């Protein structure tokens, strides 16, 4: 597949108006994406668990314009309120995807979104938010081209989501998604995420992710700026190579269920991501004192109990605590007893690996169907 495969040819079943609603999840990377080139192509492959509870629900309403004006026209609502501040990001997303969605300027859109997680939780909503919009647009394209196949639908949804936010490419399907070319993952691509097709050991089914909300504030540095810092980074080359190797080992671990090795790689990936930011020029320290307290407590608990709990981090201070479903009781007790004190207002979110995005509603309000000439 190349980019040109995503330029539609067969949009004959033109829709006058309609609406659709998608629920699209967030994801947590085990091997991290950090560093990209234009247009949003990753410098190394990454793999993530698709999450289940943390998601965005987006409704896209579309109405053909009466007068064609060659402008993008849309209103955005977040949790019921009109959000002018979200518009520039969506305009640049539309500009990037227009060649693959050539009908965008022919419609007026209303985009209504809400997140399952609190807005000020420090949890990035770009993966779930942009994948949800991408999926809505794909539903619209599918109405215009009803013979579209599901595999193409998912691939193009991931491709479009990626152009909005890199990690969003991994939020379409589940439970494990690889984004970025890797020689050992058949069909892997820098253009879109692919579901991991190999055998996955049952211990990874419904893998648990308890997200400890250490800092609910605004991000210290946007991921766009963070990725840019990798351009001049003295360790960039080694880092990209290390990620490729870690992914190769991770593929074996996911097959054989070697949880000790899983823990080693996941924690090392998280710390390497932060190490990249700490050794950038300028540098950013995104962990907080409580992040380190939690990391140390997890290490001590693991040594004491021989359970397989580990941590990972995004580009922020919150901690994702990962563990197999059969250790849930003991780990939740540990979180309650020892970790919750380090969370803002004792807040945390219980999540687990999930199966990907879901169409909630599709309404082809075809008042008139026109054949495109
Ligand atoms: C640290 O996907 O948010 O979460 O492509 O600029 O939108 P953009 O970046 P984004 O990068 C986040 C990367 C990460 C690690 C990961 O999810 O792999």
Image: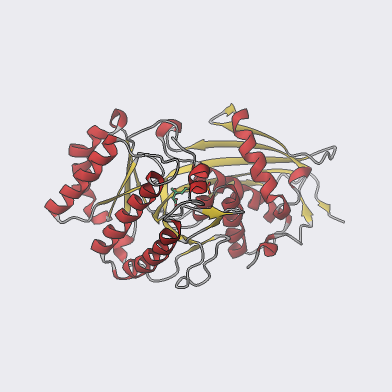
Quarter of the rendering containing residue 236? bottom left
State the residue at coordinates (41%, 41%). Answer: 283
Q: Residue furthest right?
A: 373
* Residue 55 appears in the figure: yes
| Residue at 63% across, 28% down | 84
In percent of the image, x 50 and y 51: which residue is there? 232
Q: Position of residue 266 (x, y in %)?
A: 32, 56
**Horizontal and vertical percent for residue 21?**
58, 44
Q: In this view, does 69 lie to the left or right of 75?
A: right
Q: Quadrant of the C terminus?
A: bottom right
In front: 282, or 102?
282
Within the image, what quadrant is residue 64 found in? top right
* Residue 336 horizontal/vertical position (percent): 21, 38
Q: In which quarter of the image is the N terminus?
A: bottom right
Its colouring scheme is secondary structure
Decide if residue 175 is in sight here. Answer: no
Report whether 331 appears left or right of 247. left
Q: In the shown orientation, is residue 12 left or right of residue 137?
A: right
Point 49% across, 57% down: residue = 173
Q: Where is residue 85 in the image (x, y as percent from the top left)?
A: 60, 30
Q: In this view, does 287 lie above or below 159?
A: above
């Amino acid at each position: 597949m190349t980019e040109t495969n995503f330029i539609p040819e067969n949009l004959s079943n033109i829709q006058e108006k309609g609406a659709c609603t998608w629920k699209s999840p967030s994801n947590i990377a085990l091997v991290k994406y950090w560093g990209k080139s234009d247009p949003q192509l990753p410098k190394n492959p990454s793999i993530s668990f698709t999450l289940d509870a943390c998601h965005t629900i987006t409704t896209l309403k579309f109405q053909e314009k009466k007068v064609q004006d060659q402008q993008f026209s849309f209103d955005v609502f977040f949790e019921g309120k009109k959000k002018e501040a979200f518009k520039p990001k969506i305009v640049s997303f539309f500009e990037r995807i227009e060649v693959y969605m050539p009908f965008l300027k022919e419609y007026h859109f209303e985009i209504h979104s809400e997140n399952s997680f609190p807005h000020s939780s420090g949890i990035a909503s770009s993966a779930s938010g942009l994948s949800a919009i991408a999926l809505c647009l794909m539903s619209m394209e599918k109405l215009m081209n009803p013979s579209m196949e599901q595999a193409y639908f998912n691939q193009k949804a991931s491709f479009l989501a990626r152009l909005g936010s890199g990690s969003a490419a991994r939020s379409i399907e589940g439970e494990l998604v690889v984004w970025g070319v890797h020689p050992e993952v058949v069909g892997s691509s820098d253009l879109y995420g692919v579901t991991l097709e190999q055998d996955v050991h049952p211990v990874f089914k419904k893998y648990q992710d308890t997200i400890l909300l250490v800092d609910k504030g605004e991000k210290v540095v946007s991921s766009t700026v963070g990725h840019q810092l990798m351009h001049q980074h003295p360790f960039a080359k080694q880092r990209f190579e290390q990620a490729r190797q870690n992914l190769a080992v991770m593929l074996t671990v996911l097959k054989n269920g070697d949880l000790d090795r899983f823990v080693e790689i996941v924690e090392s990936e998280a710390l390497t991501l932060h190490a990249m930011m700490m050794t950038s020029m300028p540098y950013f320290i995104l962990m907080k004192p409580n992040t380190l307290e939690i990391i140390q407590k997890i290490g001590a608990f693991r040594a004491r109990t021989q359970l397989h709990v580990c941590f990972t981090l995004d580009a922020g201070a919150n901690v994702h605590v990962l563990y197999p479903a059969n250790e849930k009781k003991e780990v939740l007790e540990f979180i309650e007893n020892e970790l919750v004190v380090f969370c803002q207002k004792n807040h945390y979110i219980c999540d687990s690996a999930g199966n990907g995005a879901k169409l909630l509603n599709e309404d082809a309000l075809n008042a008139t169907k026109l054949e495109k000439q």
